[in-house]
Amino acid sequence: MVPDEVRRCCLGKQGAFEDFPFGEQVSVFKVASKIFAIADLHALPLQVSLKCAPDEAEALRSEHPAIRPGYHLNKRHWNTVTLDGSIPDDEIEDMIQDSYDLVVATLTRPQREDLRRTNPRPAVPGDSSANDC
């Protein structure tokens, strides 16, 4: 994955938006003001930190050398993934989706209902990027 693909995948989630609370270098992707992904999209190597269920986080770390405990984050619940090509893009997309889903699950019922009603990225005929992730 390249930086634009990470951004497109994160922003393709219902209600997701990009914020820069740590400076303009670090993209923070949120849903309902809760973080589900953090990435310096200008860094080499490209890395993204994602929320993860604790058991799954450990399993992914043992399976992939490119995945380690979250950098400057709660290491039990976050992984930092180096996007060096060693992990297939579809697996990265799944990890982004899982992170998003974990955060959405913590929202209140009214927040989740509001999220279902919103559609920040309406489908545009001929826009293949709407289904990238």
Image (tube, grey):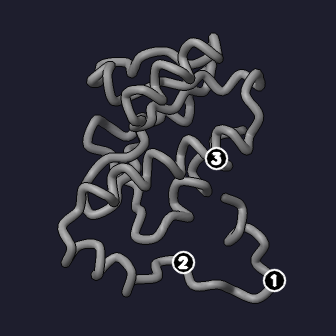
What secondary structure is found at the residue carrying circle 2? loop
Sequence-earlier tag: 2 or 1: 2
Left or right position of 23 against 3:
left
Query: Disc 3 to disc 2, how far (Cα)?
Result: 18 Å
Q: Residues within 10 Å of mark 3 (few under 14, many from 20)?
A: some
Query: Which residue is label 3 attached to?
Result: 93
Camera-side residue of 41 and 130: 130
The residue where tag 2 is placed is: 121
State the image coordinates of residue 59 (x, y, percent, origin top left): 53, 21
Amino acid at circle 3: Glu
Say whether disc 1 or disc 3 marks the residue closer to the N-terminus: 3
Other residues around mark 2 within 10 Å, as few (<14) / some (14–19) / many (≥20): few
Displayed quadrant of residue 60: top right
Q: Quadrant of residue 23?
A: top left
Coordinates of residue 133 in the picture (x, y in percent): 66, 58
Instruction: Find the distance from the CA under tag 1 to the CA under tag 3.
Output: 22 Å
Residue carrying label 1: 126
Q: Measuring from the top left, give residue 65's x and y in whole percent.
A: 63, 11
* Inter-mark Cα distance, 2 to 1: 14 Å
